[in-house]
Amino acid sequence: MKAIVRTNFDDSVSAYDAYEHRTGRFTTLAKLLAAELSARADGHFDAVLDAGAGTGASTRVFADRARRTVALDISREMLRELDAAPRVEADFDHLPFVDGSFDGVAFTASLFLVPEPAVATREAARVLRPGGVVGAVAPLGWVDADGTDVFADLERQSRSPTGADEVEAALADEFTVATGTWRFATTAANVRHFHAIPAMAARLYPRLDADERVARARELLAGLEGTVEQRWRWIVGVAE
């Protein structure tokens, strides 16, 4: 599974950056998550681990708020695009840091990509200092004006490897958590652009190769029109 995730994101650099340039979504999520983390932090951030840094949208946000930010990602190709902070290629299940290395760990749009979030959250707890904070954001999907899932009538559902409820439960097992939902107005075109990222098209067609899954996603979503609402759940926890 980890090898598949790594390959999916290695193949996604240009499409990921194109979506971020178009929507600013990952930057917005990181800013909102940083605000929730700061509200619960014991003083200013000294060191933050950006876990699932991608090409650096979230890293730049945290680098503006902490003395030291470390960008970690499983994808070497994603990290090649990042110059905002020290870069570490690793996965969430085996963080290459000593205990108590950070006072903040941020999984901005990343923890839902792992099959066992409980392992990752235990690692986050280990590398956090007492009183440190952890945050994660997980997608809840897209709905139309009456609250109906825009994928309800399509032949495929856009699903994460791990659902938001599982992400929240994993964090709640290790931390005292608070949670909520962010809602963003977006367009059908942006839903298509999201699924034009090979790693995100895998939510629809996980068994196809990158080019084919993106093409199939484009066909599936061709009839989607208008404005829709994208929803993300945020979860923030405090270490004992």
Image: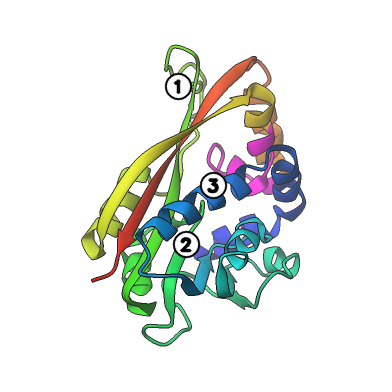
User: How many angstroms separate mark 2 from mark 1 (CA)?
Assistant: 28 Å
User: Residue 32: horizontal and vertical position, in percent?
Assistant: 50, 48
Residue 199 within the segment the image draws in magenta = yes
User: Residue 186: horizontal and vertical position, in percent?
Assistant: 61, 27
Residue 3 within the segment the image draws in magenta = no
Q: Residues within 10 Å of mark 2 (few under 14, many from 20)?
A: many
Residue farthest along the top direction in this orientation: 146
Closer to viewer: mark 3 or mark 1:
3
Q: Nearer the viewer, residue 187 or 117?
A: 187
- Which amino acid type is marked by label 3? Leu
When the figure is inspected, residue 49 is found, relative to residue 202, above or below; the finding is below
- Which amino acid type is marked by label 1? Asp
Q: Which residues are magenta?
A: 193-210
Res 148 quadrant in image: top left
Res 188 quadrant in image: top right
Q: Main secondary structure of the magenta part?
A: loop
Left or right of 233 in this view: 47: right
Q: Is residue 99 visible?
A: yes
Tag 3 residue: 29
Tag 2 residue: 106
Label located before the other in sequence (3 or 2): 3
Query: Please, what secondary structure does the residue beneath circle 2 have?
Result: strand
Label for residue 149? Answer: 1
Q: Residues within 10 Å of mark 3 (few under 14, many from 20)?
A: many
